[in-house]
Image (cartoon, rainbow, N blue to C red):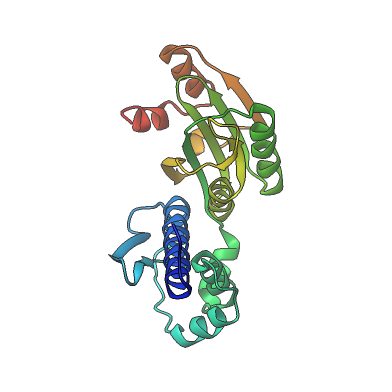
Amino acid sequence: MELHGGDEAEAEAEAEAEAEAEAAWEEVSVLSAIYCAQGELRLLQQSADDGPVVQINSTVGEERRLDCHIRQKLLDHAAALPLEPMVHQLVQWFQQHVEVPEELSRGEEEKEEQCTAVLLLDHIRSHNRYVGLLERWTQQLQLTGRLLLGRHILVILQGLRPSIKEFCRLLKTVKVDVDSSGKKCKERMMKVLIETPLSSSCAHGLQGFVVKNYQSLAELTAAFQEINMTQLYQQISPS
């Protein structure tokens, strides 16, 4: 098909708009995996013209919430970033630069929340590369973990909540595996099945990063029992 100058420019503009829309929705997918607690992320609007609009609720302190009116600061910082999806970068900047009252800051330093999370992966085709990355990320982020390989692929993580969120972000944004055609791909289908504060009963259940295969539901149940997480397994087993 022959395109004239105006038609070619219009086609390029449409292709660019489609690419931007795809990138925006991909970032929403990443954000939904990172900010997965109930009420933490809300999709406020979606339209072909403006794209998705999301709201992220960030809590400071255990029981108190701060309303920080820094819209202009965020807009100024956004203007200095490359023209690409940037919401997660803005949230990280916000968390690093927001002024927290001294008494809340001391409370956060005294007690950082330890969590347990269970992730569901879609597939692992490039086994050595994928597993190697998972192990490296747990070490870098000071997490402990267990990879359960069977009918369902589960990753159990324990550590600081921000580190678990960063692990999820890496899974969604780094090409960790290959698709059915052999092309490198990201873990777009990863789901966070549960994220919960670390209980005393399973505080010492995980050490290092261990890969374990299972063949049956009974073996999967036993794998959770082995690390004192039977109750956690019962919460996710319906899914």
Q: Seen in the image, is 19 located left or right of residue 157?
A: left
- Where residue 227 appears, x then y in whole percent? 54, 26
| Residue at the spot 32% in from the left edge and 61% down from the top edge | 42
Front in this rendered view, residue 139 or 87: 87
State the quadrant of the N terminus: bottom left
The one of 151 and 13 positioned closer to us in this rendering? 13
- Of 111 and 173, nearer the camera is 173
- Residue plotted at (34% across, 72% down): 50
Instruction: From the top left corner, tell me how far across and down residue 101 is, in percent.
Output: 51, 79
In the rendered view, tell whether residue 186 sits above or below residue 147. Answer: below
Q: Can residue 59 be seen by looking at this rendering?
A: no
Identity of the residue furthest to the front in this view: 2
Q: Which quadrant of the figure has residue 192?
A: top left
| 124 w.r.t. 99: above or below | above
Q: Position of residue 34 (x, y in %)?
A: 48, 53
Viewer-closest of 16 and 61: 16
Residue at screen point 33% across, 31% down: 239
What is the tally of numbered marks visible in this picture? 0
Q: Residue 198: give x, y in percent of width and height.
A: 49, 43
- To which quarter of the image does residue 95 belong? bottom right
**Can you say whether 2 is above or below 217 in the image?**
below
Q: Is residue 7 visible?
A: yes
